[in-house]
Amino acid sequence: MEGRRLLCLILVLAIGLTALSSMHLQEANASSLKTFSNYEELKQFIIMKLEEARVRQIPWIYPEAVLFRGFFGAYGTPVSSEVHAPKAVAIEYSKTNVQVEGVDEADLAKTDGEYIYTISGNEVYIVKAYPPEDMRVCSKIGLGEGRAIGLFVNDDRLVVIKSGRFPIKPIESDIVPPHTYGVSVRIYDISDAENPVLIKGVDLDGSYVSSRMIKSYVYVVTAQPVFKILGEDFVLPRIAVDREVKEIPPTKIYYSNDTIAPLSYTIIAAINALNGEVEGKAILTGYATCVYASPNNIYVVIPKWNGWFNDVRSEIHRIRVNGMEIECEASGEVPGRVLNQFSMDEYKGYFRIATTIGHVARYPSQATSLNNVYVLDAGSLKIVGKLEGLAPGERIHSARFMGDRCYLVTFRKVDPLFTIDLSDPENPKILGKLKIPGYSDYLHPYDENYLIGIGKETVPAEEGDFSWYQGVKISLFDVSNVTMPKEVDKVVIGDRGTDTPVLRDHHALLFDKKRNLLIIPILEAKIFPEKYGGEVPPWIHGEYVFQGVYVFHVSPEDGIRVRGKITHLEDQELIKSGYYFKSKYEIKRGLFIDDVLYTISDGKVKANSLQDLSEISEVRLT
């Protein structure tokens, strides 16, 4: 336990030190951001700001420290935006669970209604999936070094993104931080699924932050440290297209005079998936941690740690995107830190964001956390309305903006679900609150009157102001009366130790309202009371008894009903070791084509009937 605390302390310290490099924007707007005229101006700006930081005795921010910044890392002409007509498929099929309609997100598996494209280990498999009786592997693509992050499919283009410790080469000096990262984007022509053809390779400096696809354009965001070579020149961010390396020139690097210490770039690259054309720009700022995207704008959030948890702000940059056009048009900031992309939303000319400030502790006297909702003018990113001080001592576990409403789940011992009215942007207000055991880590709209919550059941602890996590909890909330939200049904799967990737990655969830279908991958743990000779303490971890997908029927009339389970595990493969499970047959995604449910693991793709879940066929990925 002490080792874990020390590790957490080290990680928090590292995050805090890197974020000190972020810009200090006070009442920032579009006019405060500008670009450099040339490299010498950029170089002198960095030196000047670092000297100012040294004089102010800001710890760890000295010119010499720039060389080692990599240790703390997380790790053109516009063309027509015309998109080729989609393949003629007369059947319905599921798409990746995304936040904003029309803005695709990279995922481990995709389908176009005929083929399934999936990442397995360090390869991409193309599977002829429909009809399921003839399912077979058509081809596979080796990805080489690095870790595959996700892929996009658009008509006859497959875009694969991977990340790893492979900075763009050549690097002209051996004196480079060892933990430098690169992001690789590969575009394939898949018009012939049997023979995918690589048509363009794009490499970016920096660690991967996020990506989106809007029409046929992929936007990739990375973060790269500003470091020196041989103590002289600062490295400019670079993009390589088919190994031809080009620097992003200073005239395409944004900055602010309010910067405290410019120690890192946030790089935004636009890639045309049809012809491989690339455009890149950068912001001289801190490390981006979160991205929200609408069809017209990408919002990049960068934490500013002016101290510990009690003094953190979120710096926001709005980047307008239109095909190959990328323009950083506005910047602003709000108090607190952002949980994830669902803590942000753009709606009717406003940008809304939910944050937490302070920290949560087991005992109320030690907790300092507060939760806030801010409404900003999307044009200038100036705050126009705010609601502060929600749920003292708790933190946000999930957020969802839906039209004029915001739903927040905070948690420490019980789960308050807040319903917040944003119809008057200048005066947000709480309409209702529901307190129940457990919490939701992810909120998904069923429709405008119902929400699905996925999280954990909990048991309140007797010795402190906290709770013990138990099984995975799926809730159905009725929010039709916003002043009195209700949990109308819930299902708890397994005991303590049960887990689902949906708690951390919304792409793992499959929901279809028309079919009242909800599918969740679950690693289920079960406690056997007879092994403990009496009452089982709430902190006991169960033994793993199942991994696969749970298939649910969800509707306001029927509530939540378990229809069945599907697994890929073979010969009782499950490891009942308590804390660790790993298998190539661990189901990671589910999708449907017509009335067939496909489940996908690294080892196989299996097809089952959506009517009765009977198995139709399977194909192995070897």
Image: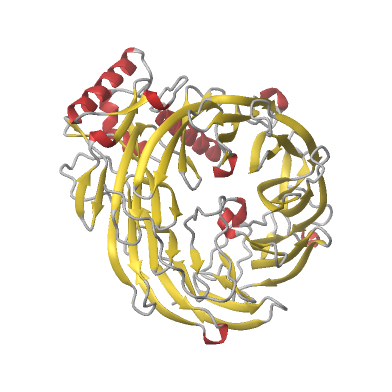
In this orientation, which residue lies closer to the viewer: 608 or 403? 403
Q: Position of residue 9 (x, y in %)?
A: 51, 33
Decide: is 585 above or below 352: below
**Residue drawn at (28%, 55%) of the image:** 277
In this orientation, which residue lies closer to the viewer: 587 or 150? 150
On the image, which quarter does residue 226 sit in?
top left
Q: Is residue 25 left or right of residue 449?
A: left
Decide: is 566 above or below 377: below
Is residue 427 at least partly visible in the picture? yes
**Residue drawn at (42%, 40%) of the image:** 320
In this orientation, which residue lies closer to the viewer: 525 or 173? 173
**Residue drawn at (56%, 50%) of the image:** 100
Q: Is residue 77 left or right of residue 91?
A: left
Q: Position of residue 290 (x, y in %)?
A: 49, 41
On the image, which quarter does residue 522 sit in?
bottom right
Is residue 462 at least partly visible in the picture? no
